[in-house]
Image: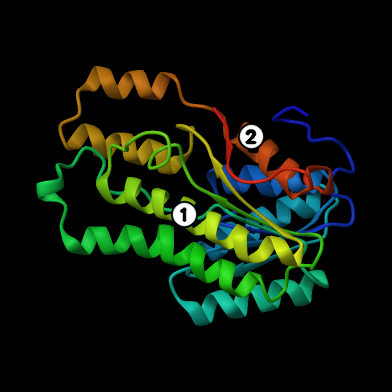
Amino acid sequence: MTGDVPSAGLLAGRRVVVVGGASGIGLATVRAAARAGAAVAVLDADGDGAARAAAGARAEGAPACAHRVDVTVEAQVAAALDAAATDLGGIDAVLHVAGIMRGQGRDVRDVDADLWAQVIAVNLTGPFLVAKHATRHLTPGAGVLVLVGSKAGVLTGSGSVPYGASKGGLHGLALTLDRQLRPRGIRVHTLCPGDIDTPLMRRSLDEARANGTAADRVAEIAAALGRPEDVASALVLLAAPVSDGVVGTVHTG
């Protein structure tokens, strides 16, 4: 399977929720899931972007819906997942891609508590709330939950103190969820990509430069960015029944 053309039928009959599907890796995942035969629900804080992503999925021939959600607000998360389950007739896989990146290049002495709290709320509390309420809907014996983390905080440090901490925490969350949910027949994975060319990453590089990171270092990172489509392909594969034998953390380039 390539990053551009997922195997036809890989997700045939599967009902997939993409949280954070309006842009970047999430948008690429919505497109890939639709092309692989899934019915897709797009959840995002950007309601208009979610609607556009769902319209794109329908243009690929896939049933698709969209719901606006702030992943830090539990009532919104519960309502959005309930609505997605109603629209799709159930949920087989939840792919949590939503996240923010703040504080790139900032010395720990200059990281204020509000910035820390904001990143932790979106990148760690958000996945917890999604997992909590997704578990009520995921198909026993065939459900899949994938939390998109990062190599930062798992294999290496990050240029952002709160971001690295949040992704390390997300990894621990997924490991713990796997222990609880695998006996119910629900697979849980963390997918940990490297640096990917997304609007989020581009803004982060601009912030790093503004916070004093050397321009040649920023240019080096920018030149080596991976493609969102390649991460989307891995997410589609993990959501598919052919990956039932896969366990634990998955790393991509």
Number of numbered discs visible in the structure rendering: 2
Report which residue position mark 1 lands on.
172
The residue mark sitting in front, 2 or 1, is 1
| Amino acid type for the residue under numbered disc 2 | Glu
Name the residue rendered at 40%, 49% in the picture: 168
Label 1 packing within 10 angstroms: few (<14), some (14-19), many (20+)? some
Rendered location of residue 18, percent (x, y)? 64, 57
Mark sitting on residue 229: 2
Is the residue under label 1 in contact with that under label 2 (CB below 8 Å)? no
Numbered disc 1: secondary structure: helix
52 left or right of 119? right
Residue 243 is at least partly visible in this image: yes
Q: In the figure, 80 relative to 22: above or below?
A: below
Alpha carbon distance from label 2 to label 1: 26 Å
Where is residue 205 shown, x and y percent of the image? 32, 34
Q: Looking at the picture, does residue 246 appear above or below residue 175?
A: above
Q: Amino acid at mark 1?
A: Gly
Residue sitting at 27 percent across and 43 percent down? 160
User: Coloring scheme of the render?
Assistant: rainbow
Residue 236, x across and y down, in percent? 73, 44
Query: What residue appears at the point 62 percent right and 66 percent down from the top-left corner?
Result: 180
Q: Earlier in the sequence, mark 2 or mark 1?
A: 1
> Where is residue 94 drawn, in percent x and y?
67, 59
**Neighbours of disc 2 within 10 Å: few (<14), some (14-19), many (20+):** many
Residue 45 visible, this angle: no
